[in-house]
Image: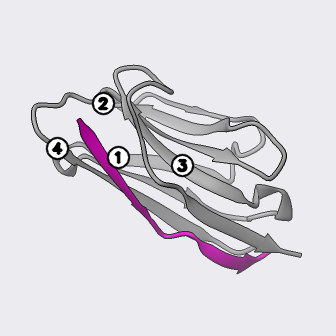
């Protein structure tokens, strides 16, 4: 079983930046894909960005050019650098880790609020 602990959410003005972190821990686990998903009130959870252990990345069109996902494989940690934030980025952001994107374990979520 993999435990994920997120940090870095908060309140920021539009145009600002935040950096999310997610550390995975546990025993005997192997993670290929680590990523970030978000869920806004009244909406379904959606993919934000994902990165494989080999460094391949995929982003939602709405965040391309503004968000950057990175990963420290040695520390089983994934980061999401969010720049030029918009009010529509407001959501609870969830970390995910598993063999394929969207599988495996989920973090508890961290709130990101962007004020206009």
Image position of 51 (left or right of 110): left
What numbered label is drawn on residue 94?
3
Q: Quadrant of the N terminus?
A: top left
Tell me the residue at 76%/51% (across/down).
40
Residue 30, position as x, y percentages in the image: 20, 28
Q: Which residue is mark 4?
A: 26
Q: Which residue is mark 1?
A: 71
In this picture the colour scheme is one colour
Mark 4 near mark 2, Cβ–Cβ under 8 Å? no
Nearer-the-camera pick, 18 or 105: 105
> Given this view, does label 4 or label 2 mark the residue nearer the observer?
4
What numbered label is drawn on residue 53?
2
Q: CA distance from mark 4 to mark 1?
A: 17 Å
Report which quarter residue 47 is drawn in: top right
Query: Which numbered disc, 4 or 3, marks the residue that appears first in the sequence?
Result: 4
Badge 4: few (under 14), some or many (20 or more) residues near its Cα, within 10 Å?
few
The residue stretch that appears in magenta: 1-14
Query: Which numbered disc, 3 or 2, marks the residue that appears first in the sequence?
Result: 2
């Amino acid at each position: 079983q993999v435990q994920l602990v997120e940090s870095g959410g908060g309140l920021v003005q539009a145009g600002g930046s935040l950096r999310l972190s997610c550390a995975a821990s546990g025993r005997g686990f192997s993670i290929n894909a680590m990523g970030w998903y978000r869920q806004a009130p009244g909406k379904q959870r959606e993919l934000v960005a994902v990165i494989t252990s080999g460094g391949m990345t995929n982003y939602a069109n709405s965040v391309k050019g503004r968000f950057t996902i990175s990963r420290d494989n040695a520390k089983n940690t994934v980061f999401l650098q969010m720049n030029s934030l918009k009010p529509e980025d407001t959501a609870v952001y969830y970390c995910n880790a598993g063999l394929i994107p969207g599988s495996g374990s989920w973090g508890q979520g961290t709130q990101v609020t962007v004020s206009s």
